[in-house]
Amino acid sequence: MSAATVTHEAPAIGRRIGPDDAAATLVVYGTYECLHCRRAWPALRALAEAGRARVEWRHFAPPGAFPNASTAAAAVEAAGAQGAFWAMHEALLTAPAPLWPEALPTHAAALGLDVATFERDLRAADVRARLEAQAASARADAVRGTPTVLLVREGADPVRLDARDPDALDAALANALAH
């Protein structure tokens, strides 16, 4: 599990929310069409907003599971180029699935983004490179499905938390930090 064993000071592979001085980082591998990711996200966001953990979202598309996952991930990264990563992230996690690629510019327009720039950025080399870095990280962390949540903290091996039960995430975090 080399990619998730980063220190808190290491540059993020994904996008982070939550306090920089949190006791741990929750590295979340997810995709926007995954029902379990959609259910887990509010609990993960609440942990970050409460200062209990820093949450780092990394895009992961399980092979063959979600046909629009890569395009949706690129859309969120393209929105990020205009400062709207988290707004698009939230929009796609709450939009009806499946996330049809032709509907993504409509989401961008609803967020007030420059749609022509958004569409160009969907295919940009830096977006593809960011997604490939996250895919490589998922391979290194032996991620097989979504959501996969790894609790990462200084001086300790990563701990996998079960995010399929969002109500249990806070207790799992507290338990993992106690050991």
Image (spheres, grey):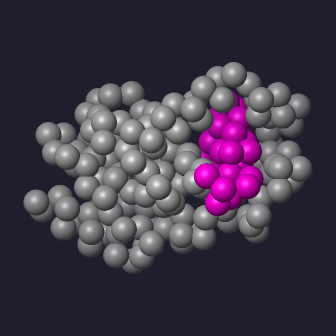
Which quadrant does the N terminus fall into? top left
Asked whether, in this view, residue 56 is left or right of residue 39, the answer is left
Residue drawn at x 17%, y 58% is 177
Quarter-wise, where is residue 84 in the image? top right
Residue drawn at x 37%, y 44% is 141
Q: Is residue 167 above or below residue 175?
A: below
Is residue 19 a member of the stretch shown in magenta? Answer: no
Residue drawn at x 71%, y 48% is 72
Q: Main secondary structure of the magenta part?
A: helix
Q: Residue 4, image x and y in percent?
A: 33, 41
Asked whether, in this view, residue 25 is left or right of residue 59, the answer is left
Q: Nearer the viewer, residue 17 or 73?
A: 73
Q: Is residue 85 above or below residue 42?
A: above
Q: Residue 30, image x and y in percent?
A: 53, 54
Q: Over which residues does the magenta segment extend?
A: 63-91
Q: Residue 21, image x and y in percent?
A: 26, 41
